[in-house]
Image (cartoon, rainbow, N blue to C red):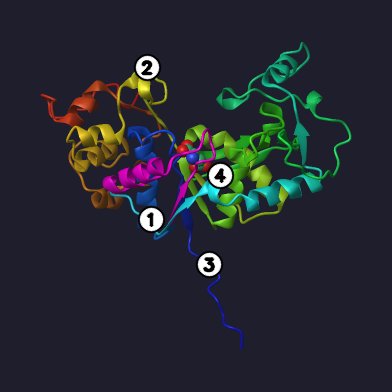
Amino acid sequence: MPEIRPTTPRETTRLAPSPTGALHLGNARTFLVNWAIARRNSWRVILRIEDLDGPRVRPDAIRGCMETLQWLGIDWDEGPIVQSEDLAPHLDAVRRLADSGHAYPCELTRTQIEEAASAPHAPEPGGPGGESRFPSSLRPGGLGPRAFADTGSNWRFATPDVEVSFHDRFAGAQRFRPAQTIGDFVIWTRRAQPAYQLAVVVDDDRQGVTQVVRGDDLLDSAARQLLLYRALGLGPEPTHTHLPLVVGPDGRRLAKRHGDTRLDAYRAAGVGRERVVGLLASWSGIIPRPEPMSPEEFARGFELSTMPRDRVTFTEEDDRWLRGVSGLSGLPSPSRRG
Ligand code: GLU
């Protein structure tokens, strides 16, 4: 008699840091929330190091990134899986897309694309996230099956002109039409590497990821990724949870210009992780104002339904509270929920 296996496999999520930028308070909050949801729901957690972007990442950057996550109290069940170490499945995917007439090589430069996108009768230039839109007029005529050859040019996905709708567990109902806003996007780069959109789909699928939790700067990418799942016949498609970003007092995404908010910098200054977790807890609807907290308490207290819907603003007062120099011991600043 064949063995009967459980029909509902365990939900799986991934923490997918890019080890190029150090972990700061903004992405730390996303990772801590992702981890807390996973632990509360007994999801499997994979650590995936996304090292395809930019120049080769040194092994000590990867170690440093893992160490900082562990310092914060985050653990995982599998990994690290280093993305660049096995590109065979990505090559196979781009081959299949080319074979089925969904992908083509493109030698056009950014300037040529931008010029075409701003021509008099071209539709709205610029997709979400400031990416330039690739106008359909630049797509080669008579798209059909072709043999993929990795010969130093970009390969683009022939984005079908359909609406993509999905339900985001935090952001709610979503509808996008990537063909209208983004057009044909790069899936394989001239540097002989898969581009982010393809890499994430191939990896999430082969690693059995069913729950994607990440910053809402990637909300519109989810639509492109779903189109790739469909063109490749992959699935089941993951459920998405996109969380608001942390911004600086100027309303822009937390970055170097807002001072050194790297976890490593606070750690080096002697700030304990209970303070960092406590600040992130006050940003995540667990407590009204920062107070020291353990990662376990964070996981116990976190509820997606009470997570603030707006972007969180990191203020100087937050920084003073972390360093323990705030006279008012961490009263929230009025602009916090900006
Ligand atoms: N590696 C990406 C980042 O650090 C995350 C990509 C994803 O979660 O799909 O922003």
Residue ID for mark 1: 76
Q: Using the numbered discs, state the Cα–Cα distance from disc 2 to disc 3 in whole angstroms.
A: 46 Å
The residue pinned by badge 2 equals 250
Query: Which residue is located at x 28 percent, y 36 percent?
Result: 264
User: Residue 167, labelled with which disc?
Assistant: 4
Q: Secondary structure at mark 4?
A: strand
| Residue name at image x 34 percent, y 33 percent | 24
The range drawn in magenta is 45-72
Judging by the rendered image, the residue that carries numbered circle 3 is 8
Q: Residues within 10 Å of mark 1 (few under 14, many from 20)?
A: some
Instruction: Name the N-terminal-most of marks 4 and 1.
Output: 1
- The secondary element bearing badge 3 is classed as loop
Residue contact between numbered discs 4 and 1, judged by CB atoms under 8 Å: no
Is residue 64 within the magenta segment?
A: yes
Given this view, does label 2 or label 3 mark the residue nearer the observer?
2
Q: Residues within 10 Å of mark 3 (few under 14, many from 20)?
A: few
Task: Give the left or right position of residue 290, taking residue 43 as reference.
Answer: left
Place residue 315 in its image quadrant.
Answer: top left
Residue 229 inside the magenta-drawn segment: no
The tag earlier along the polypeptide, 4 or 3, is 3
In this rendering, does residue 265 appear at all? yes
